[in-house]
C-alpha cells in the first residue's frame, strides 16, 4: 500500500502506473468485499481528505474516515472552494493522480429535484460530485478548474428523506413516457458514478434500499465501472443500471481508468439476475474516421454475447458528444491525444446547454445526419435494442 507510484509523463494519462500494488486488503478490512480488493485500490487509494467539519462529524463521515486510518485530513469551509485543488493550475499534470489519492467530504446544502424528461423523469440531488475515473469528455469538472476528485456528501439521510417526500408527492404515474411506462424514474448519479462511490461508503446502498420500498418510483444511474459489490444490494427491480458503452478503441483513448467495455457488457446479465433493470448508454458518440465501423462492431458484439433475457428488457440512450473549451484546455495538459479526437472545430459549433453553460457540439446538420446513420446501424446489427431517446 505504501509503495511509491511514479507520476505519469507529461501529456499522457497515468493509469498504467496504478497496477503495481500487492493484492492484500487494508488493515481491518472484511475479506470478500470487492471494495477492499487490490483492483479497487488501483482506482482509489485515498491518502488525503479535504472535509467540511460538519461532514466529518456526521455518521457517514465517521464511517468513511474509519476506513481511512492515518489519512491526512484538512478541514475546509466549503467543498466547492479548495484553492489547493480547484484553483491550482499546477494540478493539471496530476489530474489522474489526484483522482486516485484525494477525497473531498461535504454536506449537500441544496436539496432540490429537477425535472428532466430525457433519461429520467427527475434528477434527484446526488450523493456525490466528481469521480475517481478520468473520462476525457466528462462535463462535471467544467465548474471546478484544475482537479476533479470525488466529493462525497455525507448527509445521505437528508437526501433520502427529500427523495421520499418528492416521490410521495407525485402519486402513481398514470401516463407512460420514454423514461418508463409505469414508474417515475429518478437519476441518482447525475454528477458522479454510483458504482465508484460504493467503493468508499454506503451512499449508493442507502439509495438502492430506499427505492426498493417505493412502488411508484425507480432509481437510475449510469456507470462505466463494474463493481460486484452492487450485486448484493437486492434492488428488486427498483433500480435501473445504465452501462455506458462506446467502441473499444474509443474507450481505450477516452475512458481512462474505467472498466473495459467488454467487461461492462459481460456484467449485464449478472446485474439483471441480481434484480436490476439493465439499460445501455451509447455515449458519447464521437465522430472520427471509422466511427461507423466501430459502432457496428460494438452492436454485433452486443448481439452475439448478451442472453435473450437481457435483450428483452434492454433499452438505450444515444448521446452525441458535447465538449467545452475550458475542459479542452485542461485536457491538453494531461491527455492531448484525446483532444485530437474530441476537439473538432471543423464540424462543431457553440451550444447553450439547458443549464446555461456555453459548450461545443457537432453542427446541427452534421449531428442530424450522424444520428440517422447511427440508428440505421443499430437497426441493422442489433434491432432488438430499443432507443429511448437520442440527442
Image (cartoon, rainbow, N blue to C red):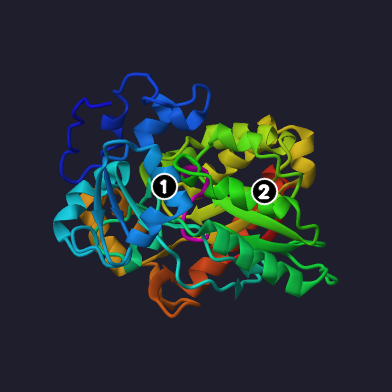
Which residues, given as a range, are shown in magenta? 190-196
Q: Residue at x 38, y 46 (%)?
A: 132
| Mark 1, other Cα within 10 Å: few <14 / some 14–19 / many ≥20 | some
- For residue 209, the mark is 2
Which is nearer the eye, 307 or 28?
Answer: 28
Q: Is residue 264 in the magenta section?
A: no
Taking 93 as reference, is 70 left or right? right
Which is nearer the eye, 367 or 326?
Answer: 326
From the image, tell me which residue sits under label 1.
62
What quarter of the picture does the C terminus occupy?
Answer: bottom right
> Is the Cβ of the residue at disc 2 closer than 8 Å to that at disc 1?
no
Which is nearer the eye, 230 or 298?
Answer: 230
Q: Residue at x 46, y 61 (%)?
A: 321
- Quadrant assignment, res 115: bottom right
With respect to residue 17, does 12 lie above or below? below
In what element is the residue under mark 1? helix
Amino acid at each position: 500500500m505504501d509503495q511509491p507510484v511514479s507520476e505519469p509523463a507529461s501529456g499522457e494519462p497515468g493509469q498504467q502506473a496504478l497496477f503495481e500494488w500487492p493484492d492484500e486488503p487494508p488493515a481491518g478490512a472484511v475479506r470478500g468485499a470487492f471494495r477492499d480488493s487490490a483492483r479497487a485500490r488501483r482506482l482509489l487509494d485515498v491518502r488525503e481528505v479535504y472535509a467540511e467539519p460538519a461532514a466529518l462529524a456526521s455518521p457517514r463521515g465517521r464511517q468513511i474516515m474509519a476506513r481511512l486510518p492515518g489519512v491526512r485530513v484538512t478541514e475546509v469551509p466549503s467543498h466547492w472552494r479548495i484553492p489547493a485543488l480547484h484553483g491550482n493550475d499546477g494540478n493539471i499534470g496530476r489530474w489522474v493522480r489526484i483522482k486516485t489519492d484525494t477525497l473531498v467530504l461535504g454536506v449537500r446544502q441544496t436539496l432540490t429535484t429537477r425535472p428532466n424528461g430525457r433519461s429520467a423523469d427527475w434528477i434527484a440531488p446526488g450523493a456525490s460530485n466528481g469521480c475517481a475515473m478520468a473520462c476525457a469528455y466528462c462535463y462535471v469538472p467544467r465548474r471546478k478548474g484544475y482537479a476533479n476528485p470525488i466529493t462525497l456528501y455525507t448527509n445521505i439521510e437528508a437526501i433520502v428523506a427529500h427523495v421520499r417526500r418528492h416521490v410521495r408527492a407525485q402519486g402513481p404515474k398514470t401516463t407512460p413516457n420514454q423514461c418508463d411506462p409505469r414508474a417515475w424514474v429518478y437519476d441518482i448519479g447525475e454528477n458522479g458514478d454510483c458504482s465508484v462511490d460504493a467503493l468508499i461508503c454506503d451512499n449508493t446502498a442507502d439509495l438502492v434500499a430506499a427505492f426498493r420500498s417505493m412502488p411508484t418510483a425507480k432509481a437510475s444511474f449510469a456507470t462505466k465501472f463494474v463493481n460486484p459489490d452492487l450485486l448484493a444490494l437486492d434492488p428488486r427491480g427498483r433500480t435501473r443500471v445504465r452501462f455506458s458503452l462506446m467502441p473499444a478503441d474509443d474507450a481505450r483513448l477516452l475512458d481512462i481508468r474505467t472498466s473495459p467495455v467488454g467487461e461492462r457488457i459481460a456484467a449485464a446479465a449478472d446485474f439483471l439476475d441480481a434484480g436490476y433493470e439493465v439499460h445501455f448508454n451509447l455515449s458519447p458518440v464521437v465522430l472520427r474516421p471509422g466511427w461507423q465501423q466501430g459502432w457496428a462492431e460494438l452492436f454485433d458484439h452486443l448481439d452475439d454475447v448478451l442472453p435473450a433475457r437481457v435483450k428483452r428488457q434492454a433499452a438505450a440512450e444515444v448521446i452525441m458528444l458535447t465538449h467545452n473549451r475550458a475542459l479542452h484546455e485542461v485536457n491538453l495538459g494531461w491527455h492531448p491525444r484525446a483532444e485530437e479526437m474530441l476537439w473538432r472545430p471543423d464540424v462543431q459549433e457553440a451550444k447553450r446547454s439547458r443549464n446555461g453553460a456555453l459548450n461545443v457540439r457537432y453542427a446541427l446538420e452534421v449531428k442530424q445526419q450522424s444520428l440517422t446513420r447511427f440508428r440505421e446501424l443499430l437497426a441493422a446489427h442489433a434491432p432488438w435494442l430499443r432507443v429511448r431517446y437520442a440527442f
